[in-house]
Image (spheres, grey):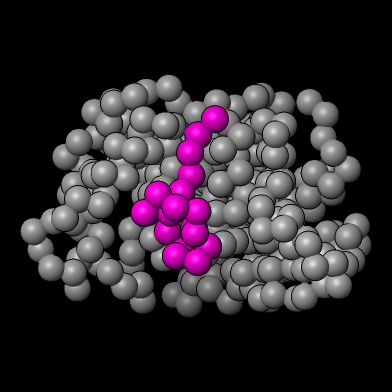
Amino acid sequence: MARSALLHVMVQAALKAGRSLSRDFGEVQNLQVSLKGPGDYVSQADRKAEDIVRSELMRARPTYDFLGEEGGETKGSDGAHRWIVDPLDGTTNFLHGIPIFGVSIALERNDEIVAGVIFNPAMDELYTAERGGGAFLNDRRLRVAARRKLSDAVIATGVPHLGRGHHGKFLIELRNVMGEVAGVRRTGSAALDLAFTAAGRFDGYWEKNINAWDIAAGMLLVREAGGFVTDLEGGNRMFENGTVLAGNEYIHKALKDAVQRPGLSPDK
Ligand code: LIP
């Protein structure tokens, strides 16, 4: 599998940040039993990972914009390119010693995602994609799952929690979906939900209240694996609306219909 120079830089940044997260994850597991928990420690691990990614990427392309979950946006002089980075997607999992988290790095060119890397150090899984070049898990080419019926499908989602709105609306969506599918999963990492969809492990995925850095790299993975990714209305405004829906051609449509079907209870 040939990687462009830019993808190589992104992979090196993700591996380096992932190794740092791995070391900190060991300590987080030790801190679980303390009353205060590892909260402050995790914030530091998150910032450290973002610093690593930022310095690796900016060293290679100093004029590109940089948008990171921790440090926000830094404008570069380039005008056409932007890095979109979540140094630790799945923070709550990491905090609780659950080994489902990852580094997510995307490159946007003229408002289009052209390269994406997601690395889960706990599973040693490196996902890469370049526009037009396919999606890969380590060295294996990925295809989305071929199942066509929701009744055979395992669907991932994100469950809103304390501090997130639309709990009632989510319950309506979930009720619509859960009655029609083989299973619903919640990993706690949007980046990995999309990566698992690209790998055919999940047949589909939807989530609301999501940020660009959670989904930018994963969106490209799914598309390069032959899948569809839109916002919940079927449009291309995922970053603006903060919603995402993914799957193969058939599951994407059926899932969109199920999620959008009006429910009985009012929104809260
Ligand atoms: C997380 C997302 C996840 C969502 C969580 C959270 P973070 O991102 O990946 O899908 O359900 O609420 O937003 O905060 O771990 O980078």
Residue at (20, 66) in percent of width and height: 168
Question: Residue 251 at x, y = what percent?
Answer: 35, 33
Number of marks drawn: 0
Magenta stretch: includes residue 236: yes
Up/down of 95 relative to 7, above or below: below
Q: Is residue 149 above or below residue 33?
A: above
Compared with residue 64, is residue 10 higher up or lower down, i.e. above or below?
above
Q: Is residue 55 visible?
A: no
Q: Seen in the image, is 167 located left or right of residue 39? A: left
Q: Locate residue 64 relative to residue 48 in the image: left or right.
A: right
Q: Is residue 180 above or below residue 188?
A: above
The picture quadrant where one finds residue 54 is bottom right
As rendered, which of 166 and 133 lies closer to the eye? 133
Image point (55%, 54%), residue name: 215
Q: Is residue 249 visible?
A: yes
Return the x and y of residue 61 as percentages of the image width and height.
Answer: 88, 60
Q: Give the residue drawn at x 82%, y 35%.
A: 3
* x then y, percent, for residue 147: 37, 23
The residue at 66%/58% (across/down) is 111
Residue range highlighted in magenta: 226-243
Residue 10 x, y percent position in the rendering? 78, 49
Give the quadrant of the C terminus: bottom left
Frontmost residue, 43 versus 188 = 188
Which corner quadrant holds the N terminus? top right
The outermost residue toward the left is 264
29 falls in the magenta region? no
